[in-house]
């Protein structure tokens, strides 16, 4: 999937994201650390903070999808797999705390063979 598959009219759409990742909108909100209103009300979905969190999650899921074969499996990794060297936190935990860049750096290091 490309990042464009998750958006319409220039905005990431929680309904599309949920459908592609085989989950619910509410679960997407929890996964990125937002309240239910942030994705239920169209004016809140368009807010920069909401869009940034959705984009960060999608970027990370897309980075690891080739490893897992499907976006749904990559999303499961994102939510549940503790990352070595990052205090046992998951990618989801780090994105929720504003550290998506740490996750991207971790994935880049894996790709470069640093942790292999």
Image (spheres, rainbow, N blue to C red):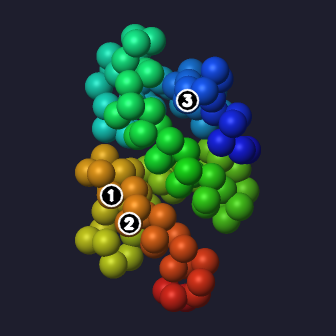
10 and 38: which one is in front? Answer: 10
Relative vertical location of residue 78 with respect to residue 17 in this rendering, above or below: below
How many other residues sit within 10 Å of disc 2, few (<14), some (14-19) or many (≥20)? Answer: some
Relative vertical location of residue 91 with respect to residue 54 in this rendering, above or below: below
Dot 1 corresponds to which residue?
Answer: 99
Helix, strand or loop under label 2: helix
Q: Quadrant of the N terminus?
A: top right
How many other residues sit within 10 Å of disc 1, few (<14), some (14-19) or many (≥20)? Answer: some
Dot 3 corresponds to which residue?
Answer: 12
Whole-percent x, y for residue 77 in the image: 51, 56
Whole-percent x, y for residue 44 in the image: 37, 18
Which residue is painted at 60% across and 27% down in the image? 10
User: Is residue 115 rendered to the left or right of residue 19?
Assistant: left
Dot 2 corresponds to which residue?
Answer: 102
Q: Residue 112: which quarter of the image?
A: bottom right
Mark 3 vs mark 1: which is more N-terminal? Answer: 3
Dots 2, 1 in contact, CB < 8 A:
yes
């Amino acid at each position: 999937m490309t990042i464009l598959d998750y958006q319409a009219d220039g905005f990431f759409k929680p309904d599309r994201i949920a459908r592609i990742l085989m989950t619910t909108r509410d679960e997407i909100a929890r996964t990125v650390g937002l309240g239910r209103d942030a994705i239920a009300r169209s004016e809140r979905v368009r807010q920069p903070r909401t869009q940034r969190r959705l984009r960060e999650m999608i970027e990370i899921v897309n980075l690891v999808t080739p490893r897992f074969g499907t976006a749904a499996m990559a999303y499961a990794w994102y939510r549940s797999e503790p990352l070595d060297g990052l205090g046992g936190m998951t990618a989801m935990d780090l994105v929720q705390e504003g550290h998506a860049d740490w996750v991207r750096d971790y994935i880049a290091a894996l790709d470069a063979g640093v942790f292999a």
